[in-house]
Amino acid sequence: MSTVEARPQDATDGRPDGQIAVENPATGETVAHVPDMSAEQVAQLVARARRAQPGWAALGFDGRAEVMYEARRWLVQNRDRMIKTIVDETGKTREDAQLAEISFVADSLGFWAKKAESYLKDERVRSHSPFAWGKKLVARYRPRGVIGVIGPWNYPLANCFGDAIAALMAGNSVILKPSEITPLASLLMAEGLRAAGLPEDVMLVATGRAETGTAVVDHCDMVMFTGSTATGKKVMARAAETLTPVSLELGGKDPMVVLRDADLERAANAAVYWSMSNGGQICMSVERVYVEEPIYDEFVQKVTEKTRALRQGRPGELGSVDVGAVTFAAQVEIIERHIRDAVEKGAKVVVGGKSGAGPGRFFEPTVLTGVDHSMEIMTEETFGPALPIMKVRDEQEAVRLANDSRYGLNSSVWTRDLAKGERIARTIEAGNTCVNDAVTNYGAQELPFGGIRESGIGVRHSAHGIQKYCSTHSLLITRFAPKSELYFFPYSKRRSKLLERLIVLMYGRGSRKRKRGR
Ligand code: NAD
């Protein structure tokens, strides 16, 4: 049962005033209604969160960590309820909700509870500058205040509340703005946090659409945004008006490079899993594959067979289906458009290719061959269960094509030669690259995760992923000092000459290394 009760539908448009209907994409049924919050309501939430923040920060790392561990316990105890809520609002399988939402967020709660303090501890700094001799220098991290976390519909828990954890552990309050398509997991998690002892108003959920998100950008002290590249650009433009810092996790078109000496069975299994898992609705799904000529046919055959064997349908008991529904209605049109465009330009659909019959919204797991970069399916984010596979002459061509993208999120290289794999991985232009794996890097939260180019700005996870929620505050403390410095007023010829001699002495030489080499 979701936290927000379904209300009787209004006779005219199926939606009570000021409410958003939440649909189960696998059945087409309305499962709940949530408020469509106005800018004024968001401003009020931010004001409450701002008042609550100093008390939360004052609890210290240990006090905050206790709440996170308790929230983790709550999440595991309430996993069935949370899985049902996520499955109902996304149409994803229970397994997709279990692994990437419950397990990841439970792990993340403990990770930040344990690591936040060490990532944010004061840094004692030593300076080379003569102006700083004898002084104490400290770089410290201070919570920014109220962080706006705006999330997408594909992972309503992991990519919404998931990003709030580090923000909270840093001592901030959070306004959580889930997608209007999937707001229920955030509301349920807020209930869990209250049960775990999070003080009132430290995390508030702002349900609503674009206007609600815009108000979050306007009123918060920093915005952590996950969503499409197009919306990310709007968020950044809006944030520029108030010089609000943003961290953007956006779309991807992640390449997989399969070399002739790869373990083909593992590569084919991974290609199918990481392109179809969560219905292909993962920002770092395998979205395009480049396979060296000698193994191309065998690879395509394996992927085709494995894709054909996938079971798709309404999520039921554990183990009943492999691929669930398409969460967002408009996504079906994008998938269809990409496939139509590819076929018109000469591609072949070897499995799937069509939307499934209703009720509910499904798209068949699809494999395409004969693709190239004139087709949208190789250059634009499809975000559905569709895998295009392209034959390449050699590794150079594979790398050139992998890098031929406006995106740069995740990527992978497959070979038994690990030295070669790492060498090639280092030439891939993306935020993250795996060798003989894909997506798994996301679970290693000690590693930064983020995109380059139009896949985003900034990272989540690692020390950087929590330091971004803080402003740096640098301290210089002078202990023993003369009454006046050489460079203080009044200027005098003698002291200026002395300073000049010092400048020549200190900076007048060339590189010491070069001199030694002469
Ligand atoms: P979206 O951009 O349509 O919406 C994301 C969020 O932004 C929603 O909460 C939405 O209400 C809000 N929003 C819409 N307009 C806004 C505005 N003008 N100002 C502020 N907020 C606004 O994205 P989506 O369709 O929900 O999610 C799918 C996209 O998210 C895909 O492109 C996917 O690749 C990306 N994604 C990226 C990552 C990552 O880590 N890089 C993770 C998950 C999803």
Image (spheres, rainbow, N blue to C red):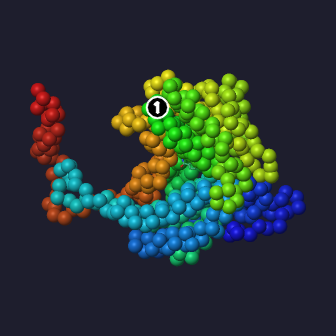
As displayed, is residue 43 above or below residue 211?
below
Secondary structure found at label 1: loop
The residue singled out by tag 1 in the image is 259
Horizontal side, residue 508 vs residue 266: left or right = left
Q: Kindly identify the residue that appears in the image at 44 percent across and 70 percent down.
A: 65
- State the image coordinates of residue 244 (x, y, percent, origin top left): 51, 53
Q: Kindly identify the residue that appears in the image at 66 percent across and 46 percent down.
A: 310
Is residue 190 in view from this perspective?
no
Quadrant where the N terminus is found in the figure: bottom right
Is residue 469 in view from this perspective?
yes
- Residue 379, image quadrant: top right
- State the image coordinates of residue 55 (x, y, percent, origin top left): 47, 74
As displayed, is residue 386 above or below residue 348?
below
Residue nearest the viewer, comparing 290 with 266: 266
Badge count? 1
Q: Kindly identify the residue that appears in the image at 48 percent across and 47 percent down.
A: 450
- Residue 289, image quadrant: top right
Badge 1 crowding class, 10 Å Cα cut-off, few under 14, some 14 to 19, many 20 or more, is: many
- Residue 132, image quadrant: bottom left
Residue nearest the viewer, comparing 27 with 418: 418
- State the image coordinates of residue 149 (x, y, percent, origin top left): 56, 58
Quadrant where the C terminus is found in the figure: top left
Residue nearest the viewer, comparing 334 with 96: 96
Q: What's the amino acid at mark 1?
A: Leu
Horizontal side, residue 500 vs residue 246: left or right = left
Horizontal side, residue 499 vs residue 10: left or right = left
Horizontal side, residue 492 vs residue 439: left or right = left
Q: Kindly identify the residue that appears in the image at 54 percent across and 28 percent down.
A: 296
